[in-house]
Amino acid sequence: MRSAPKKKAFPAIACTVLSFLLLLTACAPRSAAVSGTSFAMGSLITANVYTDEATAATITGAVFKEIAALDGRISATAEDSEIAALNRGETVTLSPDTLEMLRDTLSLGDSLGGQMDITLGAVTSLWGFSSDEPRVPAPDEIETALATRGADKIVFEGDRVTLAPGQQLDFGAVGKGEACDIARTVLDTSFTVPAVFSVGGTVLLYGQKTDGPWSVGVRDPFGGANDYCAVYTFTPEDGGDFCVVSTSGSYEKSFTENGKTYHHIIDPATGFPVETALVSVTAVSYIGRWSDALSTALFVNGLNDVSLGWIDEYLIGAAFIFADGGVWVSDGIRDGFRLENTDSFHFIEYEP
Ligand code: ADP
Ligand code: MG
């Protein structure tokens, strides 16, 4: 694991982890978790917090409230959100959090070669994968929508922001990771007890439970929602006592029309679902925004030297699963990554 670029973002987190360790010894975490659920960002949110019931209820209440507030700011469908107003063509004075997320996600997308691009909203809304009626748009619709893409078309006047005509933002590729970062911040600032939060399958593993390391299942791309093909076990290292695990898979949202199946991860070069031999990419990072953005960008970009550079820069590690059952896992998570279903899946090496 290379630590230099991660350390850039880490002084505050390192301090928190230190104070967290001290607090942990004082709090003596329970080995059984208190569970809670909520729904936001079109996703089920589950919490398992390793502390007494009252504290767990306070923590989950605070986290769910913050995530609902995030959803209320960035949702493209909730009419009164800041992003929905931008998408309607209004000039909007953004709240500091939304402005920071917008600017940072745009610059992250830029660093990822535009393969994860939140200005693709006009294209993703044409496909309607999040709606009840997804459809294959006509080529000229895609062309018109694709022409609105580009961070350089957005007008920033301080905190006042206006999109280009027809341009729309879609935070679908980073929102769940962001929600995990919010959960981590709540845990960091007030409660520092071991916990796992799952936001629609993007998972924050936080702290050290007393009964062993965290394990998280990696969905079997060919199985049902509860089938796992691999398990990732997170052992805290020098960088931090938490991580966010995010998976982008072509099985996640898809529909079939005239015998062809269309999935929800869009190739920004074409405006159509990415044509790829991949079925999923799992990305593990200390930062949820990165883990979520990278799972999408790596899925679009495929397994190549450029992707390896991104993994090195932003992630603890990543796992690529191919339609033929081949599984490539980067060094950073290789020790913790175990295949459960060896009939259908096998490890492969990367050959440039
Ligand atoms: P999931 O939402 O299933 O966790 P992702 O994190 O990969 O999966 O995000 C996919 C969502 O992001 C899509 O549903 C769509 O709203 C949006 N999206 C699709 N392709 C891209 C892309 N290339 N860049 C940015 N956002 C995208
Ligand atoms: Mg993503």
Image (cartoon, rainbow, N blue to C red):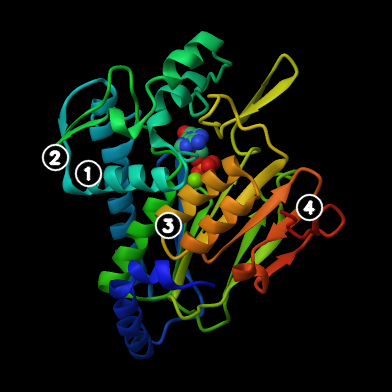
CB of mark 4 within 8 Å of CB of mark 1?
no
Q: Which residue in the protein does label 2 denote?
A: 159
- The type of residue carrying mark 3 is Gly
> What residue do we see at 67% from left, 74% from top?
335
Q: Which of the 4 quarters of the picture holds residue 212?
A: bottom right
Q: CA distance from mark 3 to mark 2?
A: 24 Å
Identify the image quadrant of the N terminus. Answer: bottom right
Q: Which residue in the protein does label 1 denote?
A: 99
Q: CA distance from mark 4 to mark 3?
A: 26 Å
> What residue do we see at 50% from left, 16% from top?
142
Q: CA distance from mark 1 to mark 2?
A: 7 Å
Q: Residues within 10 Å of mark 3 (few under 14, many from 20)?
A: many
Q: Is residue 291 above or below residue 109?
A: below
Callout 3: SS: helix
Q: Residues within 10 Å of mark 2 (few under 14, many from 20)?
A: some
Left or right of residue 61: residue 136: right
Q: Is residue 161 above or below residue 238?
A: above
- The type of residue carrying mark 1 is Leu
Q: Which residue in the protein does label 4 denote?
A: 326
Residue 347 spot, x, y in % from top left: 78, 60
CB of mark 4 within 8 Å of CB of mark 3?
no
Mark found first going from the N terminus, 4 or 1: 1
Which one is nearer the viewer's eye here, 193 or 282? 282
Mark found first going from the N terminus, 1 or 2: 1
Which one is nearer the viewer's eye here, 17 or 205? 17
CB of mark 1 within 8 Å of CB of mark 2?
yes
